[in-house]
Amino acid sequence: MPRFAFHRFWAIVLKEFIQMRRDRMTFGMMVGIPLMQLMLFGFAINSDPKHLPAAIRAADQGPFARTLVAALRHSDYFTLVRETASEEEARRLLQLGDVQFVINIPEDFSRRLLRGERPTVLVEADASDPAATGPALAAVAALADTVFDRDLPGPLRGLHARPGPVDFQIHRHYNPENITQYNVVPGLMGVVLTMTMVVITALAITRERERGTMENLLATPVRPIEVMIGKILPYIAVGYIQVTLILIAARYVFDVPMTGSLVLLYAVALLFIAANLSVGITFSTLAANQLQAMQMAFFFFLPSILLSGFMFPFRGMPEWAQWIGSCLPLTHFLRIVRGILLKGNGLLEIAPEIWPLLLFVAAAMTVGVKRYRQTLD
Amino acid sequence: MSAPLAIDVSGVTKRFGAKTVVNAVDLQVRRGEIYGFLGPNGSGKTTFIRMLCGLLTPDAGSGTCLGYDVRTQQAEIKRHVGYMTQRFSFYEDLSIRENLDFIARIYDVPERADAVQRSLKRLGLQNRSQQLAGQLSGGWKQRLALAACLIHSPQLLLLDEPTAGVDPKARREFWDEVHRLAADGLTVLITTHYMDEAERCHRLAYLAYGTMLTHGTLDEVLDAARLTTWRVTGPDLRSLAGALRGRPGVEQVVAFGLTLHVSGRDAAQLAATLAAMRDSRHEWQQIRAGLEDVFISLMNTAKDNFA
């Protein structure tokens, strides 16, 4: 067998670039997908929802009750849209979904507070979406401890509700304000790369077979490895354009902190891009047509997005799901990106996430090259 | 590279699963020869060609193509063979020039720009070199494919049904070009369904159900068939054909336009049968069996043996 020949490899690279340029639709997708995902995940989707509509049913209009209502409003989690006196109406508002919460202040609230009897404020929540109500409810609990600090000065301090048997202290590192975008936008880099790189390359060889050009290519002296790398290289360039787009948006639109080295990030991104491209190429050697290649790409994309820790916290998943997640390149890349950008991690800290990526690339490439040889026989 | 034979293989066999697609085929093609490959659809012609140019590895058999072993030196073979696939297989989203340039780069053709320019000139496409291949008509696509197959100056050209779907004028020009190339010393193996094209080959072979049924020059093939054919003209040929079928000695009755070809391998028995059938309304004349008569006869025989 002849060795790897640069002129053949380069012929493939040039051809791919020309075809990429001609295929306006695909080229548009490669830039459009990251932008659209940035808009969706960056602006539209928020796992810490605020300004949720709430109704107040206050049977006590005393100053303490008013302080409490003001504090709730200031927490930003609630927008008080309604005041009602009727329990029935409150229930109906919840049922219709007009409000997410109903806050019930009992009629003897001020009196019992002054007597130190720990009056009960009932917060009724529409908890059908726990993600929507969770943070707001946590804010209420925290509020109870501090809301009357000012209203109960000096001798009345004793009326302060006693703290519970356990004193929870929560320190939030890296993202103290719990800004979703800090977590989501860097993660998006991995998601966008997975989506476009796998799909586009999965189609690359399948398209050659479907259009009949593969037979021609195989009849020339070109070698499998030359075709593979020649096809991958142009898309690595596309991947870097996507990374850059997202980093610019992260920095200037979402104000994501960038504490670590961008050079390191770009270097590791190469590995991740290569991982996804080799998956795509491998799919395209397995699929009989472009539709199948597309389906395989989605088969890979779904667990990637669900089990990698992008959508849901990785540690919250059962062990078997974590195992699957650990086999996916996106899982490791997410930790690397978030680590570098938010925590300022260096090479040493991200090393444990790099070798699984290397292993993955090697495995996928081997399968791809092996499968490619057999295509006509 | 002074071997007199461009292709010299024997016993070449290819199986896909339980199905034997090419069964122990022997083939010798001399250098500078135009060799025609005929046979019904699915007879294994394409598979056989793919084995010659290194796209498939034979399951059995051995031999050489341009002096290189077809089993072990496929990479060498690919470098010196031009293979034109049945279906247009260049990039429709690349222009004519880009396609030629791509192939030239793959083969590392020396002085690439010149080679591409020469090729364009021979195609008569200098002015349309920026046009996308996908926008070309069938005839032009075929010429582009031929030019691309020739750009690395191969010694052997394998053409798989190159003229399917091409109009008669373009077909004629294509064959003139093939003959010019052969005159320059290029060996050409070509598959076709057209009898007039088969007659333009130096030698030909007929393949059915993976087996080579006959081969040789046109005359050799016709003589070897030992087929006697009578041509009948006159009215109401359809009912006459029905009456003739199944009679002793009558092996095939085929309508050719306004005439009927009645053939059989036992000349005496056929003549006896026809003598009894003759009437004054029809004109009966014994002719030399044509290539088509021979191939239909071969195919029917093969069907009996393999079906």
Image: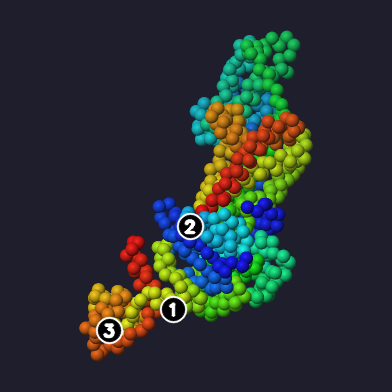
Residue at numbered disc 3: B236
Nearest the eye: A294 or A124: A294
Residue A96 visible from this viewpoint: yes
Residue for point 74% across, 41% down: A267
User: At numbered mark 2, what does the secondary structure look like: helix, strand or loop?
Assistant: strand
Q: Same chain for labels 1 and 3? Say yes or no.
A: yes
Residue for point 47% across, 78% down: B199
B60, above or below A348, in the image: below
Nearest the eye: A222 or A136: A222
B68, above or below A257, in the image: below
Residue at numbered disc 2: B61
Q: Chain of mark 3?
A: B
Residue for point 57% across, 30% down: A322
Pick whichever of labels 1 and 3 is earlier in the sequence. Answer: 1
Work out which residue is located at the far left of the displayed protein and give it.
Answer: B276
Q: Give the amino acid type for the residue marked by disc 2 in the picture.
A: Gly
Classify mark 2: residues with Cα within 10 Å, few (<14), some (14-19) or many (20+). some
Residue at numbered disc 1: B219
How far apart marks 2 and 1 lie (CA) works out to: 29 Å
Classify mark 3: residues with Cα within 10 Å, few (<14), some (14-19) or many (20+). few
